[in-house]
Image (cartoon, grey):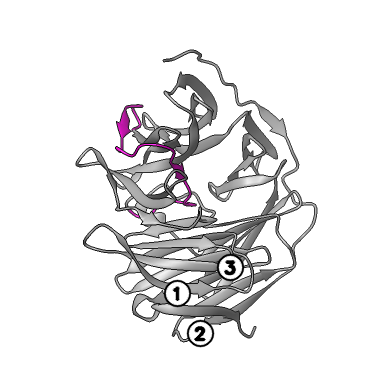
C-alpha cells in the first residue's frame, strides 16, 4: 500500500578527506599444511569496523574477495590487493559503520547508526536517509535505487540524474535485513529477511515467497555469482543459502545446515560456503543432495570480523578474511583445504 511520495535526500557539506593517515604493512603469509598463496595488509589500527569485499558488485562478473574497508575513528580506509601489490584510498564518514559499499572511485555508501549516507568525493558532500533498520542498494524499474526499512515500513528511493524520488509501502511483518538480488546476471530487486519468512522482491516490486517460515536474517556480506545469499534462522539455529532463479521464477533454497549459534559472518560462492565464528572459518561444499558438507577449517590468531569466499575455478577458492588489525587474501586449491589449518603471517 502506497502511503507517501516524498523523500528529498538533500545534500550536506562535508570535507571528505580523512583527518589522518593510517600506517600499514603489506606482508605474505601461509596456511599450515597447504600450498596456498597468502597476502596480508596489517594496519596500525585497531579498526572499529571492517568489511571484506567492500566494493559494490552489480553483476556476476564483479565478484571479488581481494579488498577490504576499515573504519578507524571517523576515517575509512579501503585496501585492494592486485597482482601481489596493494592499492589504498581513504575518506571520512559521519557515524559508526554497520555496513559500507564503495560504489566507484568517487562515491561510497555508509550505513551508520540507523542512517544510510552516500558520500561524493568530487563534491565534498553527502546525502542521507535517517531511521533505517535495514537497507539494500539495487535497481528498481531499471533505475538505481536504495531501499530502506523501519519495522514493517519500506521506502523505495530511485535516483535519476541525481534527483531522488521515493515511495513508501508497508509489509505484513517486520523486516530484519535486506540485500540486493541478481536478475539475469545483474542486480535487480532485493531480498528481505523478516519475522515471517524470506522473500524476493523483483524490480517491479512483485513479491515472491521462498516457502521458508519463521524468523530469517540475511547474514552474508555479499551475494555470489548467481545471486545467492546466506540466511540464518534464530528459531532453529540453521543456515541455508537462497537465490531467485530468473528463468524459473522461483526462490531456490539449500537444505538446512545446523549450527551451534549465529555465525558472526558468512559468504557463499557457487558450491562453497564459509561461516566465521570467533577466530575460525569453516568451509563447506554443496553436494548433489543440496546439503552442505564440511571441508575444512582455517584458524586465525585473532577474532574474525568478516569473511568472503569466491570460487573462480573448479578447484580454486579465494578467501578474504578481516580482523581488527588486518586483512588476509588467500588463494588455495580446494583439494588441499580439507581438515584443520592455521593462518600465520610471513615475511615482508
Residue at the disc numbered 2: 32
C-alpha separation, residue under disc 2 versus residue under disc 3: 15 Å
Name which residue lies at 37% across and 56% down: 257
Q: Position of residue 103 (x, y in %)?
A: 53, 46
Q: Which residue is mark 3?
A: 279
The secondary structure type at the circle numbered 2 is: loop
Q: Quadrant of the N terminus?
A: top left
Secondary structure found at label 1: strand
Q: Is residue 165 magenta?
A: no
Residue 331 circle label:
1
| Residue 17, placed above or below residue 289 | above
Q: x and y percent of residue 212 in the render? A: 33, 39
Q: Secondary structure at mark 3?
A: loop
Q: Earlier in the sequence, mark 3 or mark 1?
A: 3
Is the stretch drawn in magenta largely helix, strand or loop? loop
Disc 3 from disc 1: Cα separation: 19 Å
Task: Tell me the quarter of the picture where residue 246 sits.
Answer: top left
Q: Which range is magenta? A: 202-225
Residue 255, x across and y down, in percent: 30, 53
**Mark 3, mark 1: which one is toward the viewer?**
3
**Is 329 placed left or right of 200 in the picture?**
right
Amino acid at each position: 500500500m502506497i502511503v507517501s511520495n516524498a523523500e528529498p535526500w538533500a545534500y550536506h557539506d562535508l570535507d571528505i578527506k580523512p583527518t589522518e593517515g593510517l600506517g600499514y604493512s603489506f606482508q605474505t603469509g601461509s596456511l599450515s599444511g597447504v600450498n596456498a598463496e597468502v597476502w596480508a595488509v596489517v594496519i596500525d589500527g585497531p579498526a572499529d569496523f571492517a568489511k571484506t569485499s567492500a566494493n559494490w558488485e552489480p553483476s556476476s562478473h564483479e565478484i571479488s574477495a581481494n579488498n577490504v574497508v576499515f573504519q578507524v575513528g571517523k576515517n575509512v580506509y579501503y585496501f585492494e590487493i592486485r597482482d601481489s601489490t596493494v592499492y589504498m584510498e581513504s575518506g571520512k564518514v559521519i557515524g559508526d559503520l554497520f555496513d559500507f559499499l564503495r560504489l566507484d572511485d568517487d562515491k561510497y555508501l555508509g550505513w551508520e547508526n540507523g542512517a544510510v549516507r552516500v558520500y561524493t568525493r568530487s563534491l565534498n558532500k553527502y546525502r542521507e536517509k535517517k531511521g533505517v533498520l535495514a537497507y539494500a542498494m539495487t535497481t528498481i524499474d531499471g533505475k538505481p535505487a536504495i531501499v530502506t526499512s523501519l519495522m514493517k515500513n519500506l521506502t523505495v528511493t530511485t535516483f535519476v540524474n541525481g534527483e531522488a524520488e521515493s515511495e513508501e509501502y508497508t509489509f505484513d511483518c517486520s523486516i530484519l535485513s535486506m540485500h540486493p538480488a541478481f536478475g539475469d546476471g545483474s542486480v535487480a530487486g532485493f531480498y528481505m529477511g523478516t519475522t515471517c519468512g524470506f522473500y524476493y522482491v523483483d524490480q517491479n516490486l512483485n513479491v515472491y515467497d521462498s516457502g521458508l517460515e519463521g524468523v530469517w536474517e540475511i547474514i552474508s556480506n555479499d551475494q555470489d555469482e548467481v545471486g545467492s545469499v546466506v540466511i540464518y534462522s534464530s528459531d532453529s539455529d540453521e543456515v541455508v543459502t537462497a537465490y531467485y532463479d530468473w528463468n524459473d521464477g522461483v526462490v531456490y533454497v539449500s537444505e538446512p545446515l545446523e549450527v551451534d549459534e549465529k555465525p558472526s559472518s558468512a559468504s557463499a560462492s557457487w558450491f562453497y560456503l564459509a561461516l566465521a565464528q570467533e577466530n575460525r572459518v569453516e568451509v563447506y561444499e554443496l553436494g548433489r543432495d543440496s546439503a552442505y558438507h564440511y571441508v575444512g577449517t582455517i584458524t586465525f590468531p585473532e577474532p574474525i570480523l568478516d569473511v568472503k569466499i569466491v570460487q573462480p575455478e573448479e578447484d580454486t577458492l579465494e578467501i578474504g578474511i578481516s580482523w581488527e588489525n588486518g586483512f588476509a587474501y588467500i588463494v588455495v586449491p580446494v583439494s588441499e583445504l580439507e581438515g584443520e589449518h592455521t593462518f600465520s603471517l610471513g615475511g615482508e
